[in-house]
Image (cartoon, helix red, strand yellow):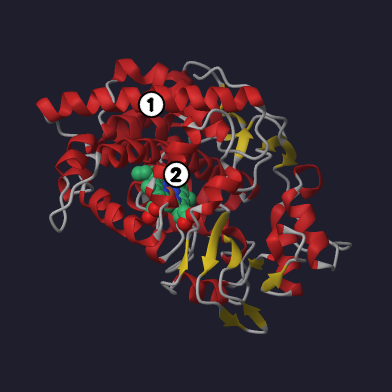
Amino acid sequence: MVSAIKAPGIPATFEPVDWNPPGLPTDGDEIMARLVDPAQRGELYPLYHQLRRVAPVYRNRPELFHGAYAFTGFAETDIIFKNPRVVNDPQVVDEAFTHGDGTFTSVMRNVMLWQHPEPHQRVRTLVKSAFTPRAMARWRPIAEQVANELCDRMEVDDHAELVDQYNYELPFNVIAKILGIPDDDFPIIRQLAWDFARAGEKSVTPEVSARGDAAARAFMEYFAELAEERRRAPADDLLSSLLEAEAEGTRLSHTELIANCILLLQAGHETTQDLLGNAQVALFRHPDQLALLTERPELMKNAVEEFLRYDASVQINHRVVLDGMTSGPAEIPPGGMVYIFLGAVNRDPARFADPDRLDVTRDVTHHLAFSFGAYYCIGAALARTEISVGIETLLARFPHLRPGTGSFEWRNTLQLRGPQRVDVTW
Ligand code: HEM
């Protein structure tokens, strides 16, 4: 386990939630202010519903969020994701991730997600090509083995804290193994991954920033050495496939290779950790669905899509509208900035009937938890495997799983959403 000091979380309970409580602000800017402030946020979805009622594409005042447009409607968002001239903005790195001595920042500049559209597309094609059918066939057995080992460890007791003991460990171990990191290195890599992730959050302290820079430096050295080993002796892992990846006569440069190994590791664990936690919270708040899924594990494929729709772990996509566009009454100028609230669009009642009800039998054909279009999550198939194995194994091993206390805590971040503590018993 990492030596993790967690920020105070947002207290919540497993009681049913009133998704449309009275007394919410009716001014869009006030709703936005509450959304982004952990001290005022409370339950997230009532605020999303309220903002969508004000306008599914809401323009902030110029002094707030650069006057960006906040998207909470599904139809509006679907259109914007399908527009190739709506792109990720590399400038975000300079605005959001510039601190410390610049090492962390330079890694963030080099990951594909924050590159200009052309290099992004080239690198993305190369990285995707490393996800071969042969590689993908290894994922489920690895996830099952890790999940069962974690359950073995929890089983010696009659209670556990799921976030640290299960939800973090499962995806961390799986992505680390898939990448080709030797098991003996996990303790050091786990600590680096934690420090790196904290440096990407909002309002970092100088200490967090320094730890992020140190982690970035150590990661670069580590992956450079591991890549050298794999170049000499390729193995059955993602790093070896990335070294071999070639498309249209190009390969990943050394800098691209290292930065995107770090991206895959980082994008590949806390996101899934949070989704597992959100799924557990949703099940505990809907005991009938928990009982149904425990009895009928064959519903898991549907359930995974419903968990993703119901409470996504990545909540915000930020984009720039290069040519400008019209969305309903909203006129977005060329270069206009957009914040897409993925959790809100996935609970738009115009798209999903009774959206606040978790229904593991629901046939969700298209949700936006993994984004859509040019930046669609490269790890979606791996994440689906991990969520499916993660929840199925937990319910099979602990068929009487239930909250150990009446309350839990949400992380205080908004970009990444998930519980930071869930006590259970069985
Ligand atoms: C439930 C778990 C996950 C969720 C909800 C999720 C969600 C997302 C979202 C919304 C994006 C788009 C980001 C943006 O446009 O700003 C994204 C991109 C990405 N994800 Fe995931 N993700 C998950 C798991 C994973 C895993 C397991 C991996 C690793 C294999 C991964 C790797 C990536 C990468 C590399 C990108 C960047 C794609 C690009 O730049 O084109 N994700 N993910």
Whichever of labels 2 and 1 marks the residue nearer the N terminus, that label is 2
Q: Which amino acid does label 1 sit on?
A: Phe
Q: Is residue 409 above or below residue 131?
A: above
Residue 323: % across, % down: 50, 76
Count residues near mark 2 (Cα–Cα under 10 Å), then give few for <14, some for 14-19, many for 20+.
many
Q: What residue type is labelled 2?
A: Arg
Horizontal side of 233 relative to 119 (left or right) equals: left
Q: Residue at x 69, y 43 (%)?
A: 14
**Of the pair 344 and 142, the residue shown nearer to us:** 344
Please report contact status of discs 2 and 1: CB closer than 8 Å, yes or no.
no
Q: Is residue 295 something one can see in this rendering?
A: no
Q: SS for tag 1?
A: helix
Count residues near mark 1 (Cα–Cα under 10 Å), then give few for <14, some for 14-19, many for 20+.
many
Residue 195: % across, % down: 52, 26
Residue 100: % across, % down: 58, 29
What's the mark number on residue 412?
none
**Of the pair 86 and 379, the residue shown nearer to us:** 86
Residue holding disc 2: 109
Identify the image quadrant of the C terminus.
top right
Q: In which quarter of the image is residue 423?
A: top right
Residue holding disc 1: 219
Residue 231: % across, % down: 14, 30
Q: In this view, does 114 lie above or below 147?
A: below
Q: Is residue 107 something one can see in this rendering?
A: yes
Residue at the outermost left position: 233
Q: SS for tag 2?
A: helix
Q: Residue at x 25, y 29 (%)?
A: 180
Q: Which residue is drawn at 26% across and 52% down?
A: 128
Q: Which of marks 2 and 1 is in front?
A: 2
